[in-house]
Amino acid sequence: MRNILILIILISGLIFTSLIKNKTRLLEKELLYLDKEINILSSDLSEASLDFHYLTTPERISLLAKNFLNENFMYYKESQIKKSIKPKKDLIILKKLRNDYIFSQLSTSEFANKKTNIIKEIDSGQLLIAKRKESQIKKLIKPKKDLVILKKLKNDYTFSQLNTNEFTNKKTNVTKEIDNEQLIIAQRIDSKNPQKSKKIISSKKVQQWAGIQIIKALLGIPTIPFE
Amino acid sequence: MHNKKGENNNSGNHIPWRSRGIFFDDYETSKYEYKQQSTFSEVKLSLNRVSFVFFIFLVVAFVFGSKIIYLASIKKENYFTNKLVPSVFLKRQDILDRNNNLLARNVKLYSAAIKPQFIIDKGKLLINLRLIFPNMDMDRIKKKIKIGKYFYIKKRLNESEWKKLWLLGDKSIDLNGKQFRVYPHESLFSHVLGQIDDDNLGISGLEKSFNKRLTESKNPLILSLDANLQHIIREELVSGNNIFQTLGSAALLMEIDSGEILSLVSLPDFDLNKRTNIEDPIYLNKITKGVYELGSVFKTFTLAAGLESESIKANTVFKDLKNQIICGGMPISEHDKLPKNLTAEEILVRSSNIGAIRIAQRVGTKNYKEFLNSLELFEKINFELEEVGIPIPFEWGKCTLETASFGHGITTTPLQLAKAYAIIGNGGHKINPTILLKKNISLRNEGQIISLKTSNIINSMLRKVVSNKKGTASFADKKGYEVGGKTGSARKVINGIYSKEKKINTFVSLFPISKPKYVLLVMLDEPKSAPDFVYEFSSGYKLTGETRNTAGWNTVIVAGNIIEKIGPILATNNLEAFNKL
């Protein structure tokens, strides 16, 4: 039993040794091949990096700039730049950056991110201002009289359910109401923008035309667009 | 010896021999016993053999096993790369600047040579060579072929030439590869890097002083130099050379805390790729090897010695300063007409020679000498380059103190001068200039030469030399960079006589002076007055042409332009940019 065990160990040792040796040989071959490949690649890389370093030397870049760029690069002090250009969006960004952060402490990517965020901030701010302005304008310019009458009529009554007298009375009342309101609005707008309001609202022609057109519309007579 | 009878008896009545006493016959082994014994010993023997063979196999398995473990554990480049696959770039390592820009690299290039003994058809070969190299001197080739010795037809072939020659398939053409050193920046670092010979051995500059390091190390040599700064400074020097028609110029930019040199330019320079034999002294490295009398830049040391020895204060007034004095039979005069009464500070700001003499006299020869020696101005500097000049030795004679006080009659190298200014500017800490990148490790550990108080006072005085309207360096007052410095205009010694026209004009500046970080030394060799140059004063006044040929009218202009251009790269927190002005 002992002998058999020894023999088994022996034979298996023999087999394993040869197997491992063979595997090692193959691995060595593969490593050698890979190393050769790496050497070729590193040699190519070295040549490419040498080309890159040669092409990006400051002498060469300035020479290329002289030969191929039409721009004549000049050195400007910040004070000169400040005088020559009015504050623009970029300068606002720079100022914001300067106030909030120290340039030298930021990496390039951080700086770029900060800049993008600030641009977004400024853009959204601008949008907000634009919206505010729009609402202010809307408040100033109220809907025109004819539309108001129509809306009021639509809201309060159903045209089809009214007879001619009732309709005439209602209409007279509504017109009066609107006239009163319009007067108040006109006064309000006059106090804020006297010239504009006069042109738009106080024109009697428009009022008359609007009134006629509404009546026409209600009676089914075709309307004429206002010129 | 055997008794057959006895054997039979024993076989008939078998009694174990141990119980019968001792007889001669008893020594004989019985048949049974022998059989038993022999079988046992055979098995034992065979078992021993098996164990032996097993042992051998075990040893073999152990050897292979350990080999496998060894292969698995070692780094592959140690075993494979070096032993089996020779690397292409082993002869010499790269040299890089502080931003990892390549300054020098070895590349494999091919050379074409002719082996005359292998020529089959001489005519055909010559025609082929003529087609590939149309400008080649064919008569020379013919002559060399006739001589019959191996010779080179062209070294450093380009890729297309190499391919064409290789495609000829001519046995007589030997295309042998060789490593060549390539310098992408051509002449930009010529004085620093130096040259190598055909066997890839350094013969000058860093290539020589770091030859062992470059050939044996596996890592590139990283310098403290900055290629971009070097280029800008060189461009400005070239421009200055053209304006002031100089013989040459030099500049050094150094960090005053660490002693790291960011730029070292000496003009004229030479293209390292051409491998020319440089013998003309004009190509000398003016910063490290050049030994000059540098003039009034020494007045700063006189003031510092006075303050350090407490002989003077910044506001000490020196009365009745004459415009000219005689020392040792030689007249010493002011460069310009100056007021008779000047404070110590004004002496430096207005660069008064007589004032400097009076300060030095107060300090005394012994103290002044000791002070200058502590700045190591007169001994050979310990530097990485081999091209280092040795200041001309001199004796402290009758008038030496007086002349030395304004930088006359004493010599040093610009590198040592910049080092001394760095010590004065950095709070008095000793530093050693270095051209190797030390990863921003402060070298302030070698002792203090002057006190912080003296350093601060001198710095504020140097600022006034530039910012004060009466200062000699007002053209370098670049807004936002807080430049401080001192000018020096010294006559050149030609054949032992001081020349009246040929000068060495120097300007050493520290900036930003409130917390100095850099020292910039600019030196122009034999500048001439520029009649067409337009001088722009800070007030906006413009002056075309100036006959005075002092540092304030030429070197300072160049230095100012340099500071204005390198300032943004160095990110010195320009005060103007940070709204502090």
Image: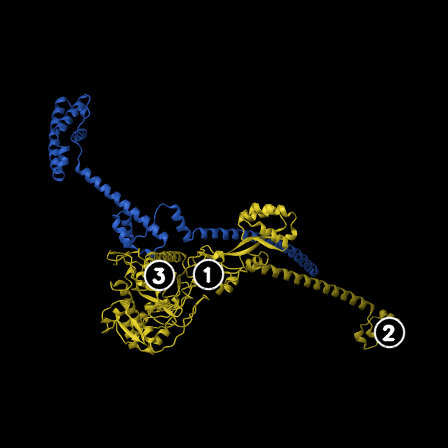
- Secondary structure category for the residue under label 3: loop
Can I make out residue B511 in this image? no
Residue B94, position as x, y percentages in the image: 48, 58
- Three-letter code, disc 2: Met
Q: In terms of sequence position, does the residue under pointer 2 or pointer 1 come before the other?
A: 2
Q: Chain of mark 3?
A: B
What is the C-alpha distance between the residues marked 3 and 1?
Answer: 27 Å
- Three-letter code, disc 1: Leu
Q: Which residue is mark 1?
A: B193
Q: Is residue B256 left or right of residue A135?
A: right
- Residue B225's tag is none
Q: Chain of mark 1?
A: B
Query: Which residue is nearer to you in this view: B441 or A190?
Result: B441
Q: In terms of sequence position, does the residue under pointer 3 or pointer 1 come before the other?
A: 1
Q: In terms of sequence position, does the residue under pointer 2 or pointer 3 come before the other?
A: 2
Q: Chain of mark 2?
A: B
Q: Is the residue marked by circle 2 packed among few (<14), some (14-19), or many (20+) residues within 10 Å?
A: few
Q: Which residue is mark 3?
A: B527
Chain represented in blue: A
Query: Which residue is nearer to you in this view: B300 or B100?
Result: B300
Q: Is residue B530 left or right of residue B197?
A: left
- Secondary structure category for the residue under label 2: loop
- Residue B1's tag is 2
Residue B465, position as x, y percentages in the image: 28, 65
